[in-house]
């Protein structure tokens, strides 16, 4: 059954084409070519971000970390931790004012009664009460202690004070609970017994776990699971959640002044005088600090704002700051995109916004998407390119270089549509920029009908074009010599040169499949490279430009091939190394006479073997230019003095020109 689709007019709210594996891989191409390592390229992309299909920037870890630090600083600049008890202090002061007003009213009532004894007693009681109120300590804990033993005149003031103490007990108790769980909201003192039982069982389970015994996790969760709504699946996960909460609360204590910490301790001692509960909490905190030292228990924050925080607000602020710290630690230490999947994306969204969460989610999915697209794969614990990925890199490099060629250059190098020098292979391929436009009408129209459906007129689009493959009767064999010496990356020549190598391989393998391409990398010594190795090739951390050894290997490779033979050499330095008679490399800078002579002798051997050497000198100075010109006069090849920006233009145009010259020669010979 045919698929059914529904279309509607774009109104600006729909989600269009976004990030996908192809877009990501296109962005990765330069990184892969430069570093030669999938893992390193992914890490760099993870750091810097990327653009999606619509050109929108996806934030990388650097930008996300900057935003995270700004979010944290904003909280510190806004809030004042010194206001944790301001609200309670203000309410106690209001209760004291109400009590003083009641004392004054009691004295006036007694005086108006006409009872002299009553008036004297009321006056004496008022004097005693006012004196006690005048002598109240300035600190909150001291006020609470004295008022708890004070005989209130006002029943309303007494009721308000008792209610305030109950609320303060709940807050302190909630602070204890919040260090372990996010579940028990509005917990009252009547729940203390069950909480103590839970903590005793928790400490016992932790000690068994440390001894390597069965901790009885399932039984514990069955009895006390309502304390832990995150529903941890193991004792390790449970302890880590609790350690994270307790570390956040410890950070709040660390951020307080010594006076504020003393007040909190005194309030806890006065209002939560259950020593067994406090002992259980201290034991749990000590055990968790030993188990999770990485939780940064010594963290503290410098609040510099004007907005005072109540106790509940302070707890929430510390939890958010702790979450930001943990997220920062994850982002800084992530060695691969997959490691980012550990982040709680909902929490990231609440802390940093939708854009940050979306970017982090995309980065976390990057490796998986590239694997599913068949572009990379895991091999022995490392990510490597697949054959499809190798082809894609070459195609990307070729497309980029062709797109830079001006129209007049392309006009000079178009191939003939039909004629001598080509034979049909009765095979077709999708049209790519730069292909000879020998359209296969049957397949092209079929593609258009498949894409748009039946009916006339048939509308063609570039994606529908399919062309006939042709093979040249004339075969050429090429060896590309790529300079891998340390000067190449130092002068920013390495990436353009490697990109040209990948593009040339892609061009030959797709457009001239009968041709041969060998690849040689050379620095202090030379070595033969396969096309599969090329994306991972990097520069050598050695000195030396051993053209002599490179020409020797190239000549040996071409001796086994047929057709017109050539060497394409890309270099930015003159020969400074050669292989001695005993087989060892010799290096000297500036170039030694014996190195130059050994290199030119190999050039003579290539010339006698009818191998042309075309040299592309990058940033050639006087001595390099002079050597290349001397070599060219011997070999009768060609020399191009170019820059990294137009190297690809020169190499590709020269190669295609050479192929067309061969085709013209074949037609004349025919």
Image (spheres, grey):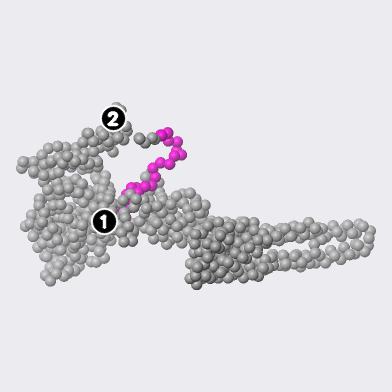
Q: On the rendered image, what quadrant is the N terminus found in?
A: top left
Residue with the mark numbered 1: 535
Q: Is residue 468 left or right of residue 292?
A: left
The quadrant where residue 283 appears = bottom right
Q: Is residue 45 left or right of residue 279?
A: left
Indicate whether 314 appears above or below 54. Answer: below
Residue at the image position 50 percent from the left and 52 percent from the top? 346
Q: On the rendered image, what quadrant is the C terminus found in?
A: top left
Residue with the mark numbered 2: 458
Q: Which segment did they paint magenta?
A: 6-34
Q: Secondary structure at mark 1?
A: helix
| Spot occupied by residue 442 in the image (x, y as percentages of width and height) | 22, 34
Visible residue check, residue 545: no
Residue at the image position 33 percent from the left and 49 percent from the top? 373
Classify mark 1: residues with Cα within 10 Å, few (<14), some (14-19) or many (20+).
many
Q: Is residue 136 left or right of residue 300?
A: right
| Spot occupied by residue 228 in the image (x, y as percentages of width and height) | 56, 59
């Amino acid at each position: 059954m045919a698929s059914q689709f529904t279309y509607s007019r774009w109104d600006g709210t729909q989600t269009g084409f976004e990030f996908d594996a192809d877009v990501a891989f296109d962005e990765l191409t330069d990184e892969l070519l430069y570093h030669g390592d999938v893992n390193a390229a992914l890490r760099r992309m993870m750091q810097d971000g990327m653009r999606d299909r619509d050109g929108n920037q996806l934030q990388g870890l650097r930008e996300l970390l900057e935003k995270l630090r700004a979010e944290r600083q904003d909280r510190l600049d806004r809030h004042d931790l010194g206001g944790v008890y301001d609200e309670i202090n203000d309410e106690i002061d209001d209760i004291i004012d109400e009590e003083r007003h009641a004392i004054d009213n009691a004295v006036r009532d007694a005086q108006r009664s006409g009872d002299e004894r009553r008036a004297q007693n009321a006056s004496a009681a008022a004097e005693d009460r006012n004196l006690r109120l005048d002598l109240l300590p300035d600190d909150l804990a001291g006020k609470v202690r004295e008022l708890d033993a004070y005989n209130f005149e006002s029943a309303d003031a007494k009721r308000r004070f008792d209610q305030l103490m109950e609320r303060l007990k709940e807050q302190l108790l909630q602070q204890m609970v919040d260090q372990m769980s996010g579940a028990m909201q509005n917990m009252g003192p009547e729940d203390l017994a069950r909480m103590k039982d839970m903590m005793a069982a928790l400490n016992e389970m932790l000690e068994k776990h440390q001894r390597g015994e069965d901790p009885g996790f399932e039984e514990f969760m069955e009895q006390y699971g309502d304390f832990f709504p995150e529903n941890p699946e193991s004792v390790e996960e449970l302890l880590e959640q609790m350690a994270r909460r307790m570390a956040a609360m410890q950070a709040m204590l660390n951020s307080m002044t010594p006076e504020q910490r003393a007040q909190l301790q005194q309030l806890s001692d006065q209002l939560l005088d259950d020593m067994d509960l406090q002992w259980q909490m201290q034991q749990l905190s000590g055990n968790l600090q030993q188990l999770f030292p990485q939780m940064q228990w010594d963290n503290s924050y410098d609040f510099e704002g004007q907005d005072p925080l109540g106790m509940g607000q302070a707890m929430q602020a510390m939890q958010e700051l702790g979450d930001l710290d943990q997220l920062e630690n994850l982002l800084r230490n992530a060695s691969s995109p997959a490691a980012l999947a550990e982040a709680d994306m909902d929490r990231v969204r609440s802390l940093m916004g939708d854009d940050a969460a979306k970017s982090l989610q995309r980065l976390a999915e990057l490796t998986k998407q590239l694997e599913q697209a068949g572009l990379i794969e895991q091999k022995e614990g490392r990510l490597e390119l697949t054959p499809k990925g190798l082809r894609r890199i070459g195609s990307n490099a070729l497309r980029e270089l062709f797109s830079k060629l001006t129209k007049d250059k392309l006009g000079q190098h178009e191939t003939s549509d039909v004629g001598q020098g080509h034979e049909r292979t009765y095979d077709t391929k999708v049209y790519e920029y730069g292909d000879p436009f020998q359209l296969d009408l049957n397949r092209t129209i079929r593609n258009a009908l498949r894409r748009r459906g039946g009916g006339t007129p048939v509308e063609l689009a570039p994606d529908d074009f399919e062309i006939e493959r042709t093979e040249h009767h004339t075969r050429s064999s090429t060896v590309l010599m790529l300079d891998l010496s340390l000067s190449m990356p130092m002068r920013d020549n390495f990436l353009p040169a490697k990109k040209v190598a990948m593009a040339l391989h892609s061009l030959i393998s797709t457009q001239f499949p009968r041709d041969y391409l060998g690849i040689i990398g050379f620095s202090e010594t030379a070595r033969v490279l396969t096309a599969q190795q090329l994306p991972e090739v990097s520069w050598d951390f050695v000195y030396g430009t051993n053209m002599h050894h490179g020409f020797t290997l190239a000549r040996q490779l071409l001796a086994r091939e047929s057709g017109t033979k050539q060497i394409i050499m890309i270099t930015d330095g003159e020969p400074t190394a050669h292989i001695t008679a005993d087989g060892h490399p010799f290096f000297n800078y500036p170039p030694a006479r014996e190195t130059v002579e050994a290199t030119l002798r190999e050039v003579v051997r290539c010339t006698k073997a009818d191998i042309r050497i075309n040299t592309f000198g990058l940033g050639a100075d006087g001595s390099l230019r002079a050597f290349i010109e001397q070599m060219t006069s011997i070999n009768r090849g060609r020399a191009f003095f170019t820059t990294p920006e137009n190297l690809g233009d020169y190499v590709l145009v020269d190669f295609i020109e050479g192929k067309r010259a061969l085709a013209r020669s074949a037609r004349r010979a025919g």
